[in-house]
């Protein structure tokens, strides 16, 4: 395992606006302008607050006419907000009644995904503040793994991703902003671990022209996603370094951890909710990991072992009722990442506040997000010492 120097200049820290409802731009923007300035006020700072802006396909298309994206940028700036990157993972309504597997569609073998990501890449230089040198668009890890059972589908997905590089280079030449696409591995998807994501991206970089493509095709490291699969954070970071793949963004998130030895799973029942998938991995005493694509299936099987559940809980939470969390992995990640890794945004991504059991929710969304950002600031201060 290699060691990394601390950041000389810490990337901006902010939160992801996929916590706010959509998919229409007006509704999302109204929620952002109601919430984010109050978060900034609670943080008692004069500096702008960075946000990772989620735009659905519908919202992105509505911003294409000349001047509209710039108008959004200026409205946000008036309230002390700046766009540090775009979340290009959810294509449609991320806050629909039931999302589940739909969030992984269209996948990367579908031309709709390529065009959606191309549109976001073209919009991003018009949304970031003047003088921004680089910014990223996160995207899904190709698709849900059962969709990509054969190599032909993976080749099509790799071809689609590589096909964006000429457009990204043209954007850089025209605007001076280097746009990178950041592939985000997630449990249950075709790319779910750092090593396989690094290998895929290295192949896509080669297909797109080699070294000149490297700055444009990167990974997005989500702390919670690695934790769910019992990956050590530093080993994940090393996997990208060893493959020569940059990490464009770190998503700071926290998973549910539970000791399932003894067979009493009542503390997990409040986390059964119908909107999103809550992939679950259980580490048994012999070192094997059983994977369940959703929490209800895991509870029905009820294996003994150490449980990790993909449920984005507040990053400051060490315990929630009778369950623990993977909070310590956040410090492990921030201690491992360094300036050579290419990260230009640290993004708190807790989108599931509304799905938390009622007794575990903060007094307001603004209060919860502000507490998360304070917590991460403290972690950054501690790892810098």
Image (cartoon, rainbow, N blue to C red):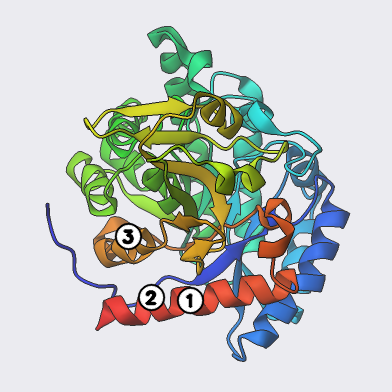
List the residue tagged with mark 1.
375
* Tag 1 and tag 2, C-beta contact below 8 Å: yes
Say which quarter of the image contains residue 337.
bottom left
The one of 244 and 194 positioned closer to us in this rendering = 194
Tell me: 310 left or right of 329: right
Residue 69 at what x, y percent from top left? 75, 58
Which of the labelled discs sits on residue 333, or is there none?
A: 3
Which is in the foreground here, disc 3 or disc 1?
A: 1
Q: Secondary structure at mark 2?
A: helix
Tell me: 365 left or right of 136: right
Question: Within 10 angstroms of label 3, few (less than 14), some, or many (20 or more) residues?
Answer: many
Q: How many marks?
A: 3
Question: Within 10 angstroms of label 1, few (less than 14), some, or many (20 or more) residues?
Answer: some
Say which quarter of the image contains residue 30.
bottom right
Q: Secondary structure at mark 3?
A: helix
Q: CA distance from mark 1 to mark 2?
A: 6 Å
Q: Closer to the N terminus: mark 2 or mark 3?
A: 3
List the residue tagged with mark 2.
379
Residue at 66% x, 63% y is 360
Q: CA distance from mark 2 to mark 3?
A: 10 Å
Which of the labelled discs sits on residue 272, or is there none?
A: none
Q: Closer to the N terminus: mark 3 or mark 1?
A: 3
Residue at 48% x, 20% y is 145
Q: Is residue 325 above or below residue 152?
A: below
């Amino acid at each position: 395992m290699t060691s990394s120097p601390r950041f000389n200049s810490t990337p901006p820290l902010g939160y992801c606006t996929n916590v706010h409802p959509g998919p229409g731009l007006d509704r999302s923007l109204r929620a952002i302008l109601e919430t984010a300035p109050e978060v900034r006020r609670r943080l008692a700072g004069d500096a702008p607050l960075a946000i990772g802006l989620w735009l659905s396909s519908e919202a992105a298309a509505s911003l294409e006419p000349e001047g509209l994206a710039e108008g959004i940028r200026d409205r946000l700036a008036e309230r002390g907000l700046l766009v540090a990157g775009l979340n290009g993972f959810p294509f449609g309504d991320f806050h629909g009644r039931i999302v589940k597997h739909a969030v992984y569609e269209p996948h990367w073998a579908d031309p709709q995904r390529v065009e959606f990501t191309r549109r976001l890449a073209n919009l991003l230089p018009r949304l970031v503040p003047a003088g921004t040198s680089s910014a990223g668009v996160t995207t899904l890890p190709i698709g849900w793994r059962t969709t990509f059972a054969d190599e032909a589908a993976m080749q099509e997905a790799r071809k689609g991703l590589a096909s964006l590089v000429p457009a990204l280079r043209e954007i850089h030449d025209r605007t001076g902003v280097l746009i990178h696409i950041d592939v985000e591995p997630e449990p249950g998807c075709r790319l779910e671990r750092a090593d396989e994501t690094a290998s895929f991206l290295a192949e896509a970089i080669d297909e797109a022209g080699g070294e000149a493509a490297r700055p444009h095709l990167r990974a997005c490291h989500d702390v919670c996603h690695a934790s769910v699969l019992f990956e050590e954070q530093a080993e994940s970071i090393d996997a990208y370094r060893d493959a020569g793949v940059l990490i464009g963004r770190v998503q700071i998130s926290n998973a549910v951890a539970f000791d399932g030895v003894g067979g009493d799973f009542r503390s997990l029942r409040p986390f059964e909710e119908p909107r999103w998938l809550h992939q679950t991995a259980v580490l048994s005493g012999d070192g094997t990991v059983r994977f369940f694509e959703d929490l209800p299936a895991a509870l029905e099987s009820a294996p003994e072992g150490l449980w990790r559940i993909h449920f984005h809980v507040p990053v400051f939470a060490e315990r929630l009722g009778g369950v623990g969390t993977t909070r310590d992995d956040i410090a492990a990640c921030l201690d491992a990442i360094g300036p050579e890794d290419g990260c230009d945004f640290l993004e708190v991504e807790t989108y599931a506040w509304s799905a938390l059991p009622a007794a575990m929710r903060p007094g307001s969304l603004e209060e919860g997000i502000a507490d998360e950002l304070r917590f991460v600031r403290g972690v950054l201060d501690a790892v810098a010492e």
